[in-house]
Image (tube, helix red, strand yellow):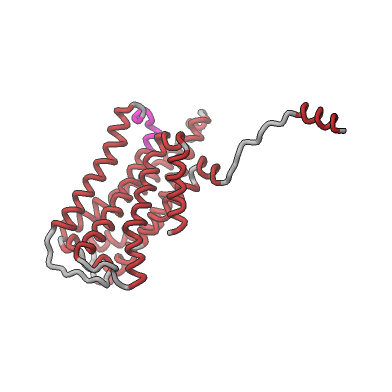
């Protein structure tokens, strides 16, 4: 997690220091996503690591268990949803940039989805974690204090898994694939404008880097989950699905690293590259001659 934290802090540092990086519209969703992941690492994954380090949670109260569940659920969902929004925005910026030019268009297609998703997920998990009543007892030496109330409600649990988690993951994977196919199909036409092609290609590479991580991490989990829901379900599949879910944490941790290494202006600053200064040959020659 340390490299991920350092990369996230580096992104935030450049958001503060570099006005052009902060103001550039195509960077805004990625910046928000990295900030959310940093909060997830600090507020949620730190509790998880402490739990596995000590074998039980540090604060053994019902409220703390519910808070841990709430943080784990909402961060997992909001990260995949914001990545899905990031994917759709990249597609629009490459092929339909006219839809994101005016302030009104940016409000409708950018700010409203980000705020709406955040409010919806907050209310959904607030109700299912703190308000939903169930008969399960909390076990302080189990991950998330044992079986959650949300998982005991089959309809709500299935909706949460399919819509709040798997649907945005599907959008990321399929949307990235469609973007790549579309770009390859129209490559010659797009390369006529070298300035736009260079800018678009940088955005595409950023998205594909994240999409590859999603394919590696999420596709096996999606296959096991859908097989369990649609065809066959037993305790062994539950255990496999449970352990594979932990790989989703890896996906979140890698995104800040991808964001830094696939953002040219951040990498250029990180490597300390500067434009070589021009040398006045005449003055150098005269100075050398006078010294001799």
Q: Is residue 83 left or right of residue 287?
A: left
Q: Is residue 27 left or right of residue 149?
A: right
Question: Over which residues does the magenta segment extend?
Answer: 91-100
Is residue 85 rendered magenta in the image? no
Q: How many marks?
A: 0
Q: Pick the residue in front: 168 or 68.
A: 68
Residue sitting farthest toward the right: 292
Residue at position x 65%, y 36% from top?
Answer: 276
Report the quarter where the C terminus lies. top right
Q: Pick the residue in front: 98 or 142.
A: 142
Residue at position x 32%, y 57% from top?
Answer: 43
Q: Pick the residue in front: 81 or 22.
A: 22
Answer above or below: position of 97 versus 211.
Answer: above
Is residue 99 rendered magenta in the image? yes
Q: Is residue 237 visible?
A: no
Q: Position of residue 36 (x, y in %)?
A: 34, 49
Report the quarter where the N terminus lies. bottom left
Q: Pick the residue in front: 237 or 48.
A: 48
Q: Quadrant of residue 70?
A: bottom left
Q: Is residue 186 left or right of residue 277?
A: left
Q: Which secondary structure dominates the residues rendered in magenta? A: helix
Residue at position x 50%, y 43% from top?
Answer: 266
Q: Is residue 281 visible?
A: yes
Q: Position of residue 212 (x, y in %)?
A: 43, 52
Q: Is residue 218 left or right of residue 258?
A: left
Q: Position of residue 199 (x, y in %)?
A: 48, 35
Q: Quadrant of residue 72?
A: bottom left
Answer above or below: position of 49 versus 173.
Answer: below
Residue at position x 33%, y 42% from top?
Answer: 85
């Amino acid at each position: 997690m340390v490299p991920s934290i350092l990369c996230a802090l580096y992104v935030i540092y450049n958001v503060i220091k570099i006005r052009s990086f902060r103001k550039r519209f195509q960077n805004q969703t990625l910046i928000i996503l990295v900030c959310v992941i940093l909060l997830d690492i600090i507020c949620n994954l730190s509790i998880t690591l402490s739990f596995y380090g000590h074998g039980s949670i540090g604060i053994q109260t019902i409220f703390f268990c519910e808070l841990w569940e709430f943080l784990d659920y909402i961060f997992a969902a909001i990260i995949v949803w914001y990545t899905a929004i990031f994917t759709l925005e990249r597609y629009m910026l490459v092929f339909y940039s006219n839809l994101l030019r005016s302030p009104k268009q940016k409000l409708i297609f950018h700010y409203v989805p980000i705020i709406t998703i955040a409010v919806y997920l907050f209310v959904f998990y607030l109700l299912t974690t703190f308000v939903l009543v169930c008969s399960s007892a909390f076990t302080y030496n189990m991950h998330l204090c044992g079986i959650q109330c949300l998982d005991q409600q089959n309809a709500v649990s299935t909706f949460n898994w399919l819509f709040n988690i798997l649907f945005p993951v599907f959008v990321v994977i399929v949307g990235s694939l469609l973007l790549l196919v579309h770009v390859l199909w129209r490559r010659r036409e797009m390369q006529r404008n070298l300035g736009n092609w260079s800018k678009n290609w940088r955005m595409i590479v950023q998205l594909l880097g994240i999409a590859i991580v999603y394919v590696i991490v999420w596709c096996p989990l999606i296959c096991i989950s859908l097989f369990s829901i649609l065809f066959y379900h037993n305790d062994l599949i539950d255990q496999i699905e449970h352990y594979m879910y932990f790989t989703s944490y890896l996906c979140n941790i890698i995104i800040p690293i991808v964001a830094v290494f696939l953002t040219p202006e951040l990498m250029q600053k990180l490597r300390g590259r500067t434009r070589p200064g021009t040398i006045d040959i005449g003055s150098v020659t005269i100075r050398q001659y006078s010294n001799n």
